[in-house]
Amino acid sequence: MTQGSPFGLSPNLHHLETSATIAISQEAKRRKAAGEDVIDLGAGEPDFPTPAIAADAGVRAIRDGKTHYPANEGILELRAAAAKHLSLLSGGRPVNADHIVVSNGSKQSLFNVCFSVFGPGDVVAIPAPAWVSYPQIVHLTRGRPVLVPGDPEWGLKLSVRDLDRVVPGAQGLILCSPCNPTGSVYTHAELKAIAQWARARKVWVIADEIYRRIHYGPGPAPSFLDLPDDFLERVIVIYGVSKAYAMTGWRIGLALAPAKVAKAMAALQSHTTTGANHPAQWAAAAALGDERVEQDVVRMVAEFRKRRELVVSRFRQELPGVEFVEPLGAFYFFFRVDSFGGISGTEFCTRLITSTGVALVPGGAFGDDRWVRLSYAAATEQIEQALDRIVGFAKKLSD
């Protein structure tokens, strides 16, 4: 047994915590199974079906016998489709398919990248609030995650000044835009400033752009790929089909990295999962490579936009004193609850699901328990019912 660790478990797991977002989803499902009237707005998962063209491509791959071990880095057809797709999103800039590695979901892509570029003691800056898995993944590399609080007046985003003040010696930065959990989106100028900061200090930047296509401004959200090549020498972009293409269960993630990092990631993956699900890779290739699928994405984003307007307008009209982040991308609404008599996000969510059956995620899961995350990746009717209950609950807290 390993000395000094509980129950003989490896010290690798000392900091490991169960994903809070998954735990909330499981609790909602448990209550539903028990017959309770539950509306789950905790899950970060589109409620739409996978586009038919992508689904059919996956089924066809199975029937065609494409069910064997794929290449460690992913099938060429998917990497080529992803390279062309990312190129088109950023004005036709060159994207090398040989620098793309396909993994079992973008979460594994993130793990592979972190494990390839960070090591014991490395300090990794993470803008907070942040997706629950970022600090956990850094801990697994034996690195040291440092949450850097974002500015409430700036959509809880952070600036280069914040990074220099809190983590002057960072070896890495994990940045999510559009952001989970806030829905904030970094502008082109903000990304450029961060890229300049990272280049000057030789900091690895891991840009999680899984929500890039779910953007409520013109076109896709700004990306590090919109910057000139000399800004990207130490930038790894994480992408995938789970969110914008409603393919969470297909488990296909992508990482676009400098050649040496891509090679290291493929080697690492060869000793862990070997490669991503083979038929699912063909489905993802169709999603990214067939222009007809883009019509499905546009329709889904338009529906997310309507739901966003519904949530924002209800809060503005009926809970005017509640602070929230204006969501410009993704499908999350992040609002502050400590104005209700100093209540924490955890207590708010616990009492909310117990008394009204609405499941939300407390901000403590993302690093700040003054806030709560609502996912509007649900049917409009469900969102309306949930908002009725949330507004009623919040007003009672204010009485």
Image (cartoon, rainbow, N blue to C red):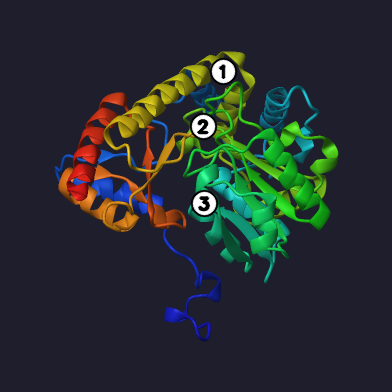
Q: Residues within 10 Å of mark 2 (few under 14, many from 20)?
A: many
Residue in view at x 52 percent, y 86 percent: 3
User: Mark on residue 66?
Assistant: none
Is residue 127 in sight in this rendering?
Answer: yes
Q: Which residue is mark 3?
A: 130
Q: Nearer the viewer, mark 3 or mark 1?
A: 3
Q: CA distance from mark 2 to mark 1?
A: 20 Å
* Extreme residue toward the bottom, this view: 3
User: Mark on residue 328?
Assistant: 2
Looking at the picture, how far across and down is residue 51, in whole percent? 48, 21
Residue in view at x 44 percent, y 24 percent: 305
Residue in view at x 41 percent, y 60 percent: 18
Instruction: Work out whether 155 lies above or below 63.
Output: below
Q: Quadrant of residue 209?
A: top right
* Extreme residue toward the left, this view: 35
Q: Amino acid at mark 1?
A: Glu
Q: Amino acid at mark 2?
A: Leu
Q: Quadrant of residue 286?
A: top right
Q: Please indicate whether residue 305 sits to the left or right of residue 137 in the image.
A: left
Q: Amino acid at mark 3?
A: Ala
Q: Which residue is mark 1?
A: 294
Q: CA distance from mark 3 to mark 2?
A: 16 Å
